[in-house]
Every structure is written in structure tokens, then in C-alpha cells.
């Protein structure tokens, strides 16, 4: 019984850190949320079917893959470079600490713009590329938050309202 309490506290911490990780590129948000759900499954506090773990696991895997592909794909479609993508990620981290919470939105755009300005390819439009990187970042972050948010919702319902 003590093990159940330890697992559920650890699971709750992972779900919360997973939600935060949707916005911080160094923390793998959805995988941590999913592991939290998995830990909760092995306790006596929850009573959900294994299919929930399967479908949320598949959604987590798809979102993790899309999170890496989407910003690059959108940036490339809008004429961007790798420096723009890297600038977007660096801008997110800097923006988060320099002027939160607005930095989460402004940082990736400014970082991508600076990254594109420093790129060797002078034929690209830095503003268009930065916009593409920003859109890709927003789509990836939104997908991660949707999956982690759903996992957090199911975790909360199963632990506290059953």
C-alpha cells in the first residue's frame, strides 16, 4: 500500500513536469506525462483499461516525432535554414528567462530571425523564415500540450474522481 502512494506521487510529479516540458525544449513533455500515466496504472488508485495506455502511447510517439519534423518542415517550406530553427529554440529558452511569459511567444520568433540573419544563404527572407519557424514551433508545442493535457486530464479523473 505504501508503494501505491509513492508511485502515485511520482506519477503526479511526472505528469506535471510533462506539462511544463511542453514549453521547455530540454524536457520531453509528453513522454514524461505518459510514464506518469503508466506508473499510475500499476497502483490500486486507478482503474483504466490498458488501451488508454496504448493509444496515449501512440499519440505521444507521433507528437514527439512531429515536434522534431514540424518546425524544420514549416521553416524549410518558407525558405528557412537550420540556423533559423536553432535560433528559434535558443530564443525560446532565452525568452523564457528574460521576459516570461511573453518570452515564450516572442523569443522563438526573434531567435529565428537572428538565426536567419546570420545564415550564409543571403537569398532567404529572414522575416518569412522566422515566421515559418515560429509557426512550426507553435504547432509542435500545441500538439505536445494537447497530448500531455489529455494525459493530465485522464490522470486527474482516474486518481481523484473515481
Image: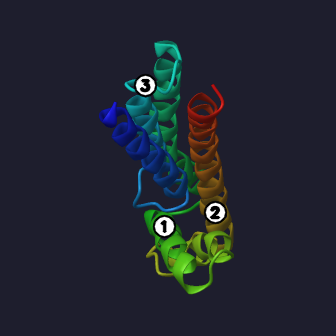
Q: Residue furthest front?
A: 1
Closer to the camera: disc 2 or disc 3? 3
Element at label 1: helix
Please report contact status of discs 2 and 3: CB closer than 8 Å, yes or no: no
Q: Residue furthest bottom?
A: 98
Left or right: 45 in relation to 136: left
Considering only order in the chain, which callout, 3 or 2, is on the residue closer to the N terminus? 3
Residue 89 is at least partly visible in this image: yes
Please report contact status of discs 3 and 1: CB closer than 8 Å, yes or no: no
Considering only order in the chain, which callout, 1 or 3, is on the residue closer to the N terminus? 3
Question: What residue is disc 2 on?
Answer: 134
Element at label 3: helix
**Looking at the picture, how far across and down is residue 159, in whole percent?**
56, 33
Whether 153 is drawn above or below 58: the answer is: below
Residue 134, picture quadrant: bottom right
Whether 51 is drawn above or below 149: the answer is: above
Question: What residue is disc 3 on?
Answer: 41
Whether 3 is drawn above or below 98: the answer is: above
Question: What residue is disc 1 on?
Answer: 89
Element at label 2: helix
Front residue of 38/21: it is 38
**Looking at the picture, how far across and down is residue 132, in whole percent?**
64, 59
Residue 68 is at least partly visible in this image: no
- Which residue is painted at 56% across and 86% down in the image? 98
Considering only order in the chain, which callout, 1 or 2, is on the residue closer to the N terminus? 1
**Looking at the picture, how far across and down is residue 18, in whole percent?**
48, 49
Q: Indicate the quadrant containing the C terminus: top left, top right, bottom left or bottom right.
A: top right
Closer to the camera: disc 3 or disc 1? 3
Whether 138 is drawn above or below 52: the answer is: below
Q: How many C-alpha atoms fall within 10 Å of the one at disc 2: few (<14), some, or many (≥20)?
A: many
- Which residue is painted at 40% across and 29% down in the image? 38
Amino acid at each position: 500500500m505504501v508503494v501505491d502512494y509513492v508511485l502515485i506521487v511520482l506519477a503526479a510529479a511526472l505528469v506535471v513536469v510533462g506539462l511544463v516540458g511542453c514549453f521547455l525544449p530540454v524536457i520531453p513533455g509528453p513522454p514524461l506525462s505518459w510514464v506518469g500515466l503508466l506508473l499510475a496504472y500499476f497502483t490500486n488508485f486507478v482503474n483504466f483499461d490498458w488501451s488508454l495506455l496504448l493509444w496515449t502511447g501512440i499519440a505521444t510517439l507521433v507528437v514527439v516525432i512531429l515536434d522534431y519534423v514540424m518546425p524544420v518542415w514549416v521553416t524549410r517550406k518558407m525558405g528557412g535554414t537550420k540556423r533559423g530553427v536553432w535560433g528559434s529554440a535558443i530564443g525560446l529558452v532565452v525568452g523564457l528567462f528574460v521576459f516570461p511569459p511573453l518570452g515564450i511567444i516572442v523569443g522563438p520568433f526573434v531567435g529565428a530571425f537572428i538565426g536567419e540573419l546570420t545564415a550564409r544563404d543571403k537569398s532567404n527572407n529572414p522575416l518569412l523564415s522566422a515566421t515559418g519557424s515560429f509557426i512550426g514551433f507553435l504547432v509542435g508545442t500545441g500538439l505536445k500540450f494537447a497530448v500531455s493535457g489529455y494525459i493530465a486530464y485522464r490522470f486527474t479523473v482516474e486518481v481523484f474522481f473515481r
